[in-house]
Amino acid sequence: MTDSENDSPRAAGGYTDDHAAAGLDASLPALDVFPNQFPAYVIEIDHPEFTSICPKTGLPDFGTLTIEYEPDASCLELKSLKLYLNGYRDLGIFQENIVNRVLRDIVDAADPVWCEVCGEFAARGGLRTTVTAGYQRDDD
């Protein structure tokens, strides 16, 4: 292996671009919304039994997803959110991609004023991972 191959992120452990993109475009249940009735408040939703699959090893990942957002015209409908999140159970996707995809899909569905998604994933191999991604609407 040459020095340039050693520097490649793909060389370490055999990870590929396909691993990195796994699950990002997978079909998941739709997120439904309903009209918001109140201004200027925050909704926090915890899903303490979140599961997915590592796209490299095929092993399960477990964690807690916390979604916090300020609704504008729409609120997330919780049953559809539950079905959406359960759609990750058999999906091969990296933890970093889970959090960013959930954020993207919530923003697309509900157009909140702001939103933050945090994934706290159980230890695997002695390492525990927390991934947080945020969105702030630009009203300019």
Image: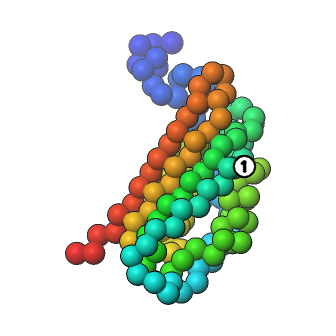
Q: Position of residue 43 (x, y in %)?
A: 51, 67
Q: Is residue 48 above or below residue 109?
A: above
Please give the name of the residue rendered at 66% of the width and 22% of the height, measured from the top-left corner. Answer: 125
Is 101 placed left or right of 84 in the picture? left
Vertically, is 120 above or below 112? above
Q: In which quarter of the view is residue 33 placed?
A: bottom right
Residue 24 at x, y = what percent?
58, 54
Q: Residue at x 27, y 75 (%)?
A: 139
Write down the residue under mark 1: 49
Number of numbered discs overlaid on the protein picture? 1
Residue 63 x, y percent position in the rendering: 66, 43
Element on which disc 1 rests: strand
Quadrant including the C terminus: bottom left
Within-10-Å neighbours for mark 1: few <14, some 14–19, many 20+:
few
Residues 2 and 15: in front is 15
Question: Is residue 42 visible in this depiction of the protein?
Answer: yes
Q: Which colour scheme appears in the figure?
A: rainbow
Left or right: 69 in relation to 82: left
Q: Position of residue 74 (x, y in %)?
A: 51, 81
Q: Residue at x 75, y 51 (%)?
A: 89
* Residue 55 visible: no
- Pick the residue in front: 84 or 25: 84
Write down the quadrant of residue 58 in the picture.
top right
Using residue 80 as the reference point, say whether residue 104 is left or right of it. Answer: left
6 to 17, vertically: above or below: above
Relative to residue 41, is residue 18 depicted above or below?
above
Tag 1: residue type? Glu
Q: Residue at point 54% right, 77% down?
A: 75
Residue at the left extreme? 140
Q: Nearer the viewer, residue 98 or 43?
A: 43
